[in-house]
Amino acid sequence: MANANFQLERDSYGRLVLTAENGERHEGVTPVRAFPIAAPDEGISLVNFEGHEVGWAERIADLPDGVRGLIEEELASREFVPEIERIASVSSFACPSIWQVQTNRGAAELTLKGEEDIRRLSRTRLLIADSHGIQFLVRDLNELDRHSRKLLDRFL
């Protein structure tokens, strides 16, 4: 489907309703990122309650303001991937270890079960899963302070 060949609105229950170019209405659609970590603002699929794609947007920035706002609100309400900005301390260099980190959403504590829970997404980007299933993102290793990089290097 071409980019933005649909209309999007909320119904009286707060659910998203997509109206396709042919006039067909789809109630309760959910936006899903095709590449949530690597390219979060590209490839947004709108799926119905059965999981079938009923709309597609190549780039969220190209959508009309109203549609973009609704999609961003819906995504923000479902996604929680805090970005690690600083690693203050780790309890041990052996796993499991407890990490005290500063994220873009405030201070947090995560428990790393094993080195395999640190996944490289690129040369400079990492995804760290804590023991509770929360994913923490390191967007760019080079942007971390020296102390944080030194601690992280012990696990990589």
Image (cartoon, rainbow, N blue to C red):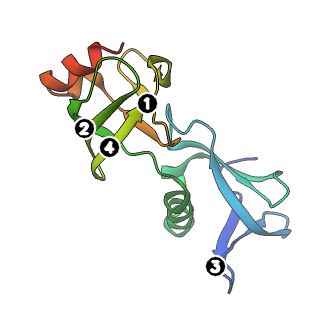
CB under 8 Å between callouts 1 and 4?
no
Q: CA distance from mark 2 to mark 1?
A: 13 Å
Q: Residue furthest left?
A: 146
Residue on which disc 4 sits = 109
Residue type at mark 2? Glu
Dividing the picture into quadrants, the one containing residue 140 is top left
Residue type at mark 4? Glu
Residue on which disc 3 sits = 14
* Side of 125 relative to 42 (left or right): left
Earlier-in-chain disc, 3 versus 1: 3
State the residue at coordinates (64%, 79%).
14
Instruction: Establish if 116 lies above or below 99.
Output: above
Instruction: Establish if 102 lies above or below 121.
Output: below
Give the foreground label among 2 and 4: 4
Q: Front-most of 123 and 87?
A: 87
Residue type at mark 3? Gly
State the SS at label 1: strand
Alpha-carbon neighbours of circle 4 within 10 Å: few (<14), some, or many (≥20)? some
Give the foreground label among 2 and 1: 1
Q: Front-most of 71 and 149?
A: 149
Earlier-in-chain disc, 2 versus 1: 2
Residue on which disc 1 sits = 128
State the SS at label 3: loop
Q: Position of residue 66 (x, y in %)?
A: 53, 70
